[in-house]
Image (cartoon, helix red, strand yellow):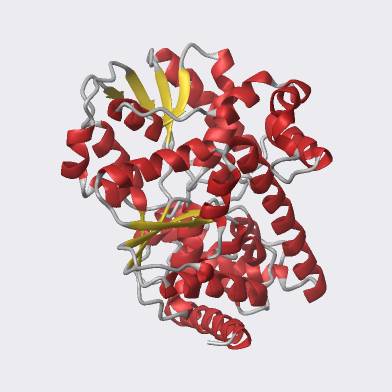
Amino acid sequence: MAIGDREATFVLSLEARARQILEDCTRCGRCVEVCPTAGPAGIDTSDPQSIVAEVLALLRGQGDPASRGARWAETCTGSGRCIGACDDGVNPRFMLAMTRMRLNELRAETERHSTGHAACQKMSEGVKGLARLQLPGDLVSRFTRSAHADDGPPADVVMYLGCNVMKTPHIALLCLEVLDRIGTSYKVFGGPANCCGVVQFRAGDAKTAGRIGGNTVAGFAGTGASRVLTWCPTCNIQLGEIVLPATNPGFALEHVVPYIADRLDALRPHLVRPVNRRVALHEHPGVAGVTEGVVKILSAIRGLELVGLDQPRVGYMCNSLAPVPAYKRELHAQELAAAEAAGVDCLVGIYHACHRELCAHERNYPFRIVNFLEIVGEAMGVERNDLFKEWKLMQDVDRVLAEVGAQVEPAGLDWESVREVLVAHVLGEQP
């Protein structure tokens, strides 16, 4: 399919699916009732049916951008509870994504395009800088080459890392180590050359999102793999709910955690070391089966005690809570306090964005903050240094630059860009 055709097919698919929602939705309001962030977003949910009606009006291009329905769409954190609550066959998470698209279409097309381009450029610079400071250049190049440039025999699966996990590459390396141990034949792709198109979609640039996401899907299909495993929940949702319905990809899409959990018998012989720790899990509900898969995997590790903190499960990753920043801070503070009260040795996250936001709190609490794959790696006798957390704990960009300075120019980076990236991610909480 030519690129122009790919864009057109994508846009037509979105419009057809939006029309189907308008036909199928009965305005029962169940999606509003179960939403965990409508209330914290300051929305009066006493009349959920009218909020849905406002959303549908916006979906038709006729609604009020200042309505509660607009506010609900703009503050959606992707928790996904609405999907199981709907009896009409509608995916309310997609409905709200399309409503945001309608709201963005109130801006000029050139503005939407430039916004998406600028956001993509900023993300790419962060990925490039942080990945090349932590990994050998040839490994970064292998992980981030375009799937269209692939050669050699087909593998069983494509391991799609997405972009931002490369900022904390120890997580990606441990994931690949686990796939090696369970005998999976895979080809790994990530980075901006294999973008899912979410940045452009969020900016309201549907044409570019369709071209980029469709191009990535075509590249994966061209590898001959029958299955694509995602790491990033953003990519999983963007491809699974936004891009793939407009294509005939020829492969199945699923998250890598349930895939590994389903093959636990192959992993279990490699979990040779006991990990005598009391740990609690930092959870998000957005991608089905992931939390359950992590619990299953961790429960197979000898010596590990997994305790519950009884905390709200909201969003699909910490950065998805950006539309409700005060609520995110409240959730983090509550969970950190609960972990301390429970006497855990580790607060264990699943996703990379959560790790970037939470890891620096380790200096203020009597427990470590790690990714669950670090626990799995320890049980396998494998360690990958978490340089990102080391830098984050320093809170001193000049000190970090002094440590990595010899790598900047050989990695093809310039000092000004590296400083900007480190300021954004070491001193801030870049999503």
Left or right of residue 117: residue 189: left
The vertical placement of 366 against 126, above or below, is above
Looking at the picture, how far across and down is residue 176, in whole percent?
38, 45
Left or right of residue 315: residue 414: right
Q: Which residue appears at 44% of the width and 50% of the height?
A: 231
Q: Which residue appears at 58% of the width and 55% of the height?
A: 191
Quarter of the picture holding the C terminus = top right
Q: Which residue lies furthest to the right in this view?
A: 416
Looking at the picture, how far across and down is residue 383, in whole percent?
41, 27
Locate residue 250: give its quadrant.
Answer: bottom left
Looking at the picture, how far across and down is residue 31, in whole percent?
44, 59
The vertical placement of 420 against 323, above or below, is above
Left or right of residue 31: residue 304: left
Asked if residue 271 shows in the view, the reply is yes
Query: Which is nearer the eye, 333 or 394?
Result: 394
Query: Which is nearer the eye, 185 or 4?
Result: 185
Asked if residue 39 shows in the view, the reply is no
The vertical placement of 417 against 82, above or below, is above
Looking at the picture, how far across and down is residue 86, in whole percent?
37, 64
Q: Which residue appears at 54% of the width and 79% of the height?
A: 14
State the count of labels.
0
The vertical placement of 261 against 115, above or below, is above
